[in-house]
Image: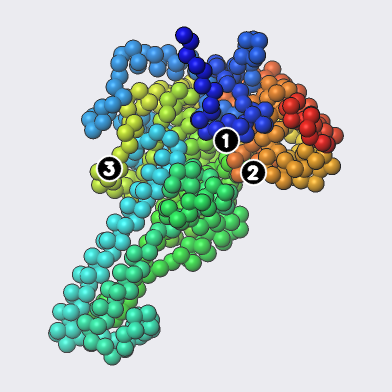
Amino acid sequence: MSPEIDERELAEPYLGGLLASLGLSVHYSRAEKDTLFYRDGTGREVSVLDLVGGYGSTIIGHNNPDIVAYAKELLDQGVPVHAQFSKHPYANDLALKVNAIIKREFGTSDDYAAIFANSGAEAVETAMKHAEFDRVAKLAELAERIDANIEKTRAAVGGGAEVVVDDVHRQLGTEAAVPAEAPLDEVVAAIRAVNGERMSAPPVFLAPEGAFHGKLVGSVQLTHNAGFRTPFSALAAQCRFVPVHEPDALAKTLESERRTLFDLTVDGRAVRVVEREMPVVAAFILEPVQGEAGIRLFDRDGALRIQQACAAADCPIIVDEIQSGMGRTGAFFAGSHLGLRGDYYTLAKSLGGGIAKAAMTLVRGSRYRKEFELVHSSTFAKDAFSTLIAGRTVDLLEAEDGKVYRTAVERGNRILDMLRKLQAEFGDVIKDVRGKGLMIGLEFHDQSGSSSAVIAEQSRAGLLGYVLSGYLLRVHALRILPTASATNTLRLEPSVHITDAEIARLESGLRGLLAALRDQDGAVLLPAEAAGDAGQ
């Protein structure tokens, strides 16, 4: 008796239905370089040119033969995955390799400690946790100094010193309802009450408008898209989003978050209430190229303003290189194009060579808290298989004096030139073309006022980018997807292996799409079964 086939969809069933409605429900069975393969209804293998590249995870292509061969070798050797709380020399080797690149690209002598993870969002949350661990430690150190100063003050008053009433003393009195002539014990009690309340306030993180740093409990709060963030806003530390294109916005935001603690100091025979700067902002986080916001690039002037404002406020900078790093923009770190040095760097996606799930958080040595290693861990992080794969991937990127980086620039410029020619021809459809290396965005003009009901409705629903993706896949065998928070922008993130012939194929497919949009031909954009029910 043959087993009964269960056709229920239980693996994210809503998403599966949405993919089907958009013409994106395809099961890929094989991959190489920039090509994915699936089998159609007749069993024939169909090739698809993949421009999504695992959202930036395949800079050296799908199933890179060097990485695949090395992975097989590691598996044949039986390298352990589960050997936690033991020595991992290969992890240190990888940390040394990446440190050497940091020193080369940023001209620094600083060492960065490495903490390992499994995904980009986890690497971001590791940076968040360490930044808060550091902030809390600084708060504790400041509280200890204040306690020591209070004891010194008691001794001074016992020797005849007097409390001087000035503006700071009056401010304390206003906040703690302590009279100016109150004895020292009451002043001390007021200081401890006010300081305790201020120190218990949650941390603040800062990020640019348009930021995307993941969808886990912590990282989603650093993601500007309210649709992703708002349902979970009560679960984690909050973030303020800064319009960093405005020259003074970050400095003003940092100043608005400024808080102080009260302290006592002895000046001769005078005891004064003074204020001490209190660390409030745990970190400022940014992507050198904002991927999910529509492939938005920072410029050097903006990066310099960020660096200066954060340095003045002693606010650490987390540079999220998860999508932009690993050579995609023509350097290992995209921030190196801007001179943007981080106190933290996060790496993932292409770090695993398109095979392994590997991620790293790098922390500048001067900020690193070694005790963090005892309060943070991750089951699969730093295992031999994924970490060795990551090390081999870095070797491939660095090979031949960084040939991959140069190729990313050359191939990216070739695609950008092609897209800009299309923009000149279809300026009524294409709003902008932008990018660096192989991280490219193609933005369309707003289509919510289209004469086609299909185009207008999908645009107003925020789904037009996915409809366009479905058309390109179905009609032209091109796999392209929009950016998550700017769905009117299609992203192109192929590997360095993309050929001139494949770029020509991309151009041909985009021409068909652009013609359909210019002609307001909504029906052609939908799968046949949907187009029959849709009006134009």
Give the residue number, with chain letter if any, for mark 2: 486
- Any mark on residue 14, and which? 1
Q: CA distance from mark 3 to mark 1?
A: 39 Å
The mark that comes first in sequence, 3 or 1, is 1
The secondary element bearing badge 1 is classed as: helix
Q: Is residue 463 toward the left or the right of residue 187 in the image?
A: right
Residue located at (60% from left, 29% from top)? 52
User: Image quadrant of residue 442?
Assistant: top right
Q: Position of residue 102 (x, y in %)?
A: 42, 37
What residue type is disc 3 on?
Answer: Glu
Q: Position of residue 371 (x, y in %)?
A: 25, 47
What residue type is disc 1 on?
Answer: Tyr
Q: Nearer the viewer, mark 2 or mark 1?
A: 1
For label 3, count other residues whose C-alpha is less than 10 Å away and answer few (under 14), some (14-19) or many (20+).
Answer: few
Residue located at (57% from left, 55% from top)? 244
Residue that sits furthest to the front in the current view: 1
Residue that sits furthest to the bottom in the current view: 181
Residue 404 appears in view: no
User: Image quadrant of residue 290?
Assistant: top right
Q: Nearer the viewer, mark 3 or mark 1?
A: 1
The secondary element bearing badge 2 is classed as: strand
Give the residue number, with chain letter if any, for mark 3: 373
Q: Is residue 97 toward the left or the right of residue 331 in the image?
A: left
For label 2, count other residues whose C-alpha is less than 10 Å away and answer few (under 14), some (14-19) or many (20+).
Answer: some
Q: Nearer the viewer, mark 2 or mark 3?
A: 2
Residue located at (46% from left, 9% from top)? 1
Q: CA distance from mark 2 to mark 1?
A: 22 Å
Do tag 2 and tag 1 residues touch (Cβ < 8 Å)?
A: no
